[in-house]
Image: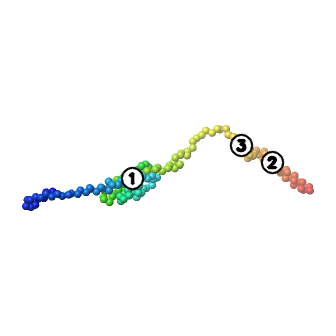
Amino acid sequence: VEVTYPDGTKDTVEVTVHVTPKPVPDKDKYDPTGGETTVPQGTPVSDKEITDLVKIPDGSKGVPTVVGDRPDTNVPGDHKVTVEVTYPDGTKDTVEVTVHVTPKPVPDKDKYDPTGKAQQVNGKGNKLPATGENATPFFNVAALTIISSVGLLSVSKKKED
């Protein structure tokens, strides 16, 4: 290095310059990864549940924060959520977490149509056995006459004794 004094004289001095490497930012040191989860349709997912799915390397002290849209769990399918990991040096990494939303099972009452359909039935019916309910009046009168006669005979026989 050349030094110039106020009177115009000059000196050359050797100087050792130590160059230190620029510190590596935390975001370049660590590689966080996003996880995934599966939830039934209509089940809400909190920010904490999402950030808990981010795997942050030990020692990094990174803090995950949800920065993307929250998943609409009313819609079945795969939903990507953006999570930002902030390190103590202020640098940031971005990862994605996948939320798989499974459709609700369809109740049986909604799967099937319980309506009947018309069918042709053979007009020839089976003959049922006679139960006596369709007896003719003649049969009824004859039965009553026999019962009365037996009753009168037994009463008159008792009078003779």
Element class at badge 3: loop
Residue 53 versus residue 123: which sits nearer the camera? Answer: 53
Quarter of the image with the N terminus is bottom left
Residue type of the residue flagged with mark 1: Gly
Question: Few, some or many C-alpha atoms within 10 Å of disc 3 (few <14, some 14-19, many ≥20)?
Answer: few
**Residue at the location (71% across, 43% down)?**
128
**Residue at the location (23% across, 57% down)?**
18
Residue 81: in sight, yes or no? no
Element class at badge 2: helix
**Quadrant in the rendering for residue 21:** bottom left
Identify residue for label 1: 34
Q: Position of residue 37 (x, y in %)?
A: 43, 53
Between disc 3 and disc 1, the foreground one is 1
Q: CA distance from mark 3 to mark 2?
A: 24 Å
Q: Is residue 33 above or below residue 127?
A: below
Residue type of the residue flagged with mark 3: Leu
Question: Few, some or many C-alpha atoms within 10 Å of disc 1 (few <14, some 14-19, many ≥20)?
Answer: many
Q: Position of residue 7 (x, y in %)?
A: 7, 61
Q: Which mark is first along the chain, 2 or 3?
A: 3
Q: Position of residue 31 (x, y in %)?
A: 36, 53
Element class at badge 1: loop
- Tell whether label 2 touches label 3 (CB within 8 Å): no
Identify residue for label 2: 143
Identify residue for label 3: 128
Tell which residue pokes out farthest to the right in this image: 161
Residue type of the residue flagged with mark 2: Ala
Between disc 3 and disc 2, the foreground one is 3
Q: Position of residue 127 (x, y in %)?
A: 71, 41
